[in-house]
Amino acid sequence: MQNIFKNKYLDQKKLVKDHFYYLVSNFSELNQKQIDNLSINIVKNAQSYKAGSPFSKLIHEFSLTSNEGIVLMCLAEALLRIPDAKTINDLIEDKIPIGDWKKYIKNDKDLFVNISSIAFLLTGKIVQEKVEENKNILGKVVKNLSGPILRNAIKQAINILAKQFVFERDIKKAIDFSNEKKHDKYTFSFDMLGEAAVTYEDSDRYYKQYEQAIIETGKGKNPHKKSISIKLSSLHPRYERNKLDLLKKELFPKAYKLTELGRDNNVDICFDAEEADRLNLSLFIFKEIIESKLIDEKYQGFGFAVQAYQKRAFFVLDWLKKYLNEVNKKINIRLVKGAYWDTEIKIAQEQGFTDYPVFTKKFATDISYLACAHKLYENDNIFSQFATHNAHSISYIKTLFKDRDFEFQKLHGMGDEIYSYLEKDDNFKCRVYAPVGGYKDLLPYLVRRLLENGANTSFIHQLKTKDFDILKLVQSPLTKIDKLDEDKIKKPIEIYGDRKNSKGLDLSEEDVVDSLKFNGKFKDIKAYSLINGEDIKSDEVIDIKSPHSSTTLGKKYFVDEKISEAAIESLKEYSSKWKNFPIEKKVEIFLKFADLIEENTNDIIEICAKESGKSIKNSIAEIREAVDFCRYYSKEALNLFQTQTLKGPTGELNQYRMIGKGLSFVISPWNFPVAIFVGQTVAALITGNVVITKPAEQSSFAAYYIIKLLLKAGLPNNAIALLLGDGALIGKKVINDKKLKNVIFTGSLETAKIIQSTLQQKENIPTFVAETGGLNCMIVDTSALTEHVVKDVVNSGFDSAGQRCSACRILCVEENVYDHTKHTLIGAMKTQQVGNPEELSTDIGPVIDTEAFENINNHIKKFDKVFQIDINLNQGNFVPPTLIEIEKLSDLKNEVFGPVVHMLKYKASNLDQLIEDINDLGFGLTLGIHSRIDKTIDRVVEKAEIGNIYINRNMIGAVVGVQPFGGYEKSGTGPKAGGPEYLKRLCHEQSISNNTASMGGNASLLSEVED
Ligand SMILES: Cc1cc2nc3c(=O)[nH]c(=O)nc-3n(C[C@H](O)[C@H](O)[C@H](O)COP(=O)(O)OP(=O)(O)OC[C@H]3O[C@@H](n4cnc5c(N)ncnc54)[C@H](O)[C@@H]3O)c2cc1C
């Protein structure tokens, strides 16, 4: 399996050229004519195919890249699940006017498309109030329609659309329907709709559905060998690589039992393929099943899907060849190209992976599919199943497998026009993937199908395009091989163009997982202050305690006033030199620093986990943010510090430039011991200021380690002093210094106010940049998808044990979906693992210290309606994720810095009041909105006085240079960290006007002028 693991990010060109090209081109050369003829015949037949499903007509009519297509997708996704008439009306009103429905109404008798277009048109007209009296019958009908009738018309149209994807609503009906004569050329694989369980309750429900489906399908001895398709993500709410041990206990047995049930009932089982980061995990499960007694000569119906768009597909099949031979067992493999391509690209970019796990050229995916088919052909222990609607892929495979038993597979509601050509073959075998279930569970499936049909590169999409060129459509993907070099999709590391994206760690990879088993390197640690680059061994020595165990990690040495003073003096001496240090050289240092942070990622993760109780995942995000700060501010500073020559009268040189101010004081918090610490310190330094940096007492060692790296990167020793110790003591000394120019602070509102009032006493007016907390709300209306909301709340409210200033503190949910949201949220909270942050499986670590622990618990005790999960941990500062129901916003006054989310019910009609109340809280940091209705979103955005607004996503993890971060009022002064204004606040502007004509007149003017 090592070969599979190590090839996840293999170079696409190398893979295609070294592994696939000869295999596919040799076969193609010998069989080109046959493959071409068959492809052309399939396409010609498809062109004249009449019995297209209403769905394919609809897709054909409304291109999914058009406004109407997008509206359709949005309506179909949301309308069937919105509980209240008002929101349905709002949604219709919001979306329908976007489309130009009239153009789809034709004179032909295509009833379905006409009915839906008319329904949309009527509504569009009504909501726009543009019904023209004399405009034929439609106008009159519209005038007489009432709201409920309209809603029904639209709902009906969407219902019909949904029905095209869903084979039947329950398994018994699905089996009956599949047995109808019209299906006798096909067999079926029933897919029980529903995936990505969010709660254990969901996964139990899905499991029971699969159980019932297998038993029902097996009844009557299953002569057509119908099968069941299963999604592992639906069987467990935490189907993630970092949960391997838990999954071995909770998911593996379920997969095993369903296979056993398949065996007992003579039903084939196929596990679907899902996201790339789940591949290893799924292979561990499949290997266990194959090795078990379930798979033998009697039962060879176990199988799984392999996605050819993944670079590892070929290696998976390579491994299976050797492995199945060794164990001498037979299985089925369904070869698909893959349905999550856009998601894979996004994840890799967001996470800063070295490359993509999937191909970025469509033709590379197609070639991979064919190369994988060769691998399957070579393997006698696999029954091959080819799931594709692409005429070329089909023809190639039919030609390759002419002497072998195999089957094709197609999706219900798609590809009928393609496969109808093959139906006449004697040995035609095709299985239909038939989704079964209620429309409630339709969404993820629907979105994937609509995307697949709408993508420009999709074969089916091109087939439906008017006047397509047949020869081009069916040409071999090999003809494009020279285009491998022209990749429009930039590598994840390059997405920001002029600066490198920070590197992430792929926690689903085995070597990464192994590298994160800490080996005790950070035992007996010592954290010193640093002045002139020297460790300061002061007298006040304090134990560094781990927040999650009673362990003493080492010692920290706190400074006194005298040492603080010495630090200030040493910086003052160097201030002018640093101010005039060339910006290019400064930037070099900070870019090197970024690289050094990346090189030492594993050390820093361990330090964050041990000293600050940060989970491994959070520690990685923290390191990436720090690296992004260095690179972003470097890029900004390089521009900002270029001297500009301004236009003016001749004989003068007018220049404008930025210069450092001088002594700056950086005070950073323990909750981001690396990211904020680095961000603030680098911003102050790169703008030419000498810096006293004072980290939180709790994260002294992280600060010491980081500043050592900064000095190693080449920062002159005298440009920075790291002072560890009591904030009030150091603060008093530094803030009262006459030369102090900037104070850059992140921390509590209370401390910010103390600093502010001290600064007000001073003669000069130092710049004060403060970032404090927030009472952050998320607003959820009834059009939002509950599962999505809940995932985002868990993430925004409980991640980092709620110790983020951006965290969701109050979840405001519309009354019609309040109970359902609460129920699902509680279910999702039960899936969170609280514990030792040094373990990869831990979701939520401890809060920082006993004081925080007590404060949070005292807050919780004030309320009656409280839900907490059981955690059973007898040491460490652990607070379980907590949900508190409140009656009104004013029940809360201050930020509670822990894993506590408050839940508030609101009425849709009071939305404006709710926004006002949120504004009245006086904080303005982050706000989340979950809604499918643009007008609602716009209304909230217009009225909310909040610095960072997040729509239909979580509300934490602002990315440097992408979502500049910071709030207003009690949340901070601005400018936003990681934004274009930040550096400007920390330096002075200087204008230099030189009378160049003062000595001897304006010689240059005289020499320039011609007669
Ligand atoms: C019976 C059946 C079962 C299925 N089960 C699964 C499953 O378990 N898991 C799953 O993921 N999918 C599954 N699918 C969906 C399947 O992946 C898609 O239907 C399939 O990708 C469409 O392939 P095609 O050959 O019909 O279309 P084509 O249009 O020829 O190919 C589409 C493929 O190209 C990829 N592509 C598009 N643009 C690019 C690009 N720029 N670079 C690289 N690749 C690109 C797409 O992502 C897609 O994979 C199943 C499909 C069927 C028919």
Image: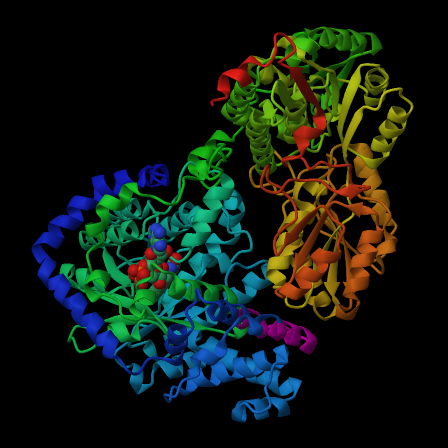
- Compared to residue 610, the image places residue 772 above or below, namely below
Q: Quadrant of residue 683?
A: top right
**Residue drawn at (48%, 75%) of the image:** 162
Name the spot of residue 122 as percent of width and height, x first.
56, 83
- From the viewer's perspective, tell me whether residue 362 is left or right of residue 763: left
- From the viewer's perspective, tell me whether residue 213 is left or right of residue 555: left
What residue range appears in magenta?
75-93
Name the spot of residue 185 as percent of width and height, x first.
25, 79
Name the spot of residue 157 as percent of width and height, x first.
51, 81
On the rendering, which quadrant does ligand 1 occupy? bottom left
- Compared to residue 181, the image places residue 241 above or below, namely above
- From the viewer's perspective, tell me whether residue 997 is left or right of residue 35: right
Check if residue 130 falls in the magenta segment.
no
Q: Is most of the magenta stretch helix, strand or loop? A: helix
Q: Quadrant of residue 305?
A: bottom left
**Residue drawn at (43%, 48%) of the image:** 345
- The reply to whether residue 782 is visible in this rendering is yes
Name the spot of residue 917 as percent of width and height, x first.
83, 57
Q: Nearer the viewer, residue 797 or 173?
A: 797
Quadrant into which the N terminus falls: top left
- Say how the picture is coloured: rainbow
